[in-house]
Amino acid sequence: MPIDFYYLPASPPCRNVLLAAKAIGVELNLKHTDLMKGEHLTPEFVKINPQHTIPTLDDNGFILWESRAIMVYLQQQYGKDDSLYPKDPKRRAVVDQRLYFDMGTLYANLADYYYPVIFRNASYDPTKLEKINDAFKFLDLFIGDNDYSTGSNLTLADLALVVTVSTYELLKYDFSPYKNVSRWFAKVKATAPGYEEANGKPLLAFQELIDTLNKNKK
């Protein structure tokens, strides 16, 4: 039975899962869910996910949402080894910390600063930009001299973080002062399996969404 994946290519959390699936080697049955058309609010979808959010996974009746939870589930259920999500408690805890940092700080600050401007025609808040700068300082510190965010090998944390950082890049945030982040970003883009298909090309859908919204504002 296929693993149904309700998603929208423009969505960074959806791209998290697409990238993880490529790295794990699991096929997803992609079910495009257009939020602008309210497809997440249909009775059929709300029955699956009462929070009516994407991404949502349906693995033969096992329903799960929240992208980082889905990433971990797919790895634990279908992963061929533990390199992406170590079994060792201490190494896994570091991966978890980076995932939570991405969710609660790096991506949260992106959404807080950019989304009101993109989706509600608000003005940029410079105090929120300072929070982004601080987040990148932390990420730069976390990476240090390592190839990846938790050490010498690619993990789920890198896959979530690279989606967020690539979205910052699309939104013209200049992270070049953070040399470790810039080096790491190039490394992950070059080594994450299926990067272009799972994140590079879908990222363009986010730009198209922004362009459409800007056109409609005129």
Image: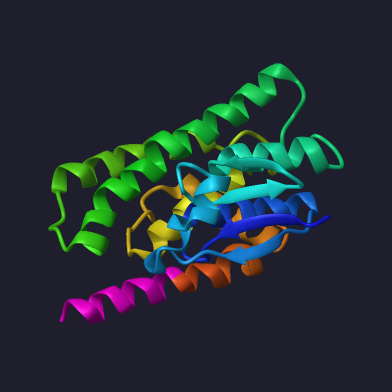
Q: Kindly indicate the quadrant of the structure image that contains residue 109.
A: top left
In depth, the one of 2 and 189 nearer the eye is 2
Magenta region includes residue 179: no
What residue sits 79% from the left and 57% below the top? Answer: 2
Q: Residue furthest top?
A: 89
Magenta region includes residue 216: yes
What residue sits 49% from the left and 45% below the top? Answer: 180
Q: Position of residue 48 (x, y in %)?
A: 58, 46
Task: Give the magenta range.
Answer: 206-218
Q: Position of residue 23 (x, y in %)?
A: 74, 52
Above or below, comparing residue 93 to residue 25 in the picture: above
The answer to whether residue 189 is left or right of residue 52 is: right
Decide if residue 102 is in sight here: yes
Q: How many marks?
A: 0
Above or below, comparing residue 58 to residue 84 in the picture: below
What residue sits 37% from the left and 54% below the top? Answer: 175
Quadrant of image for the C terminus = bottom left
Main structural element of the magenta stretch: helix, strand or loop? helix
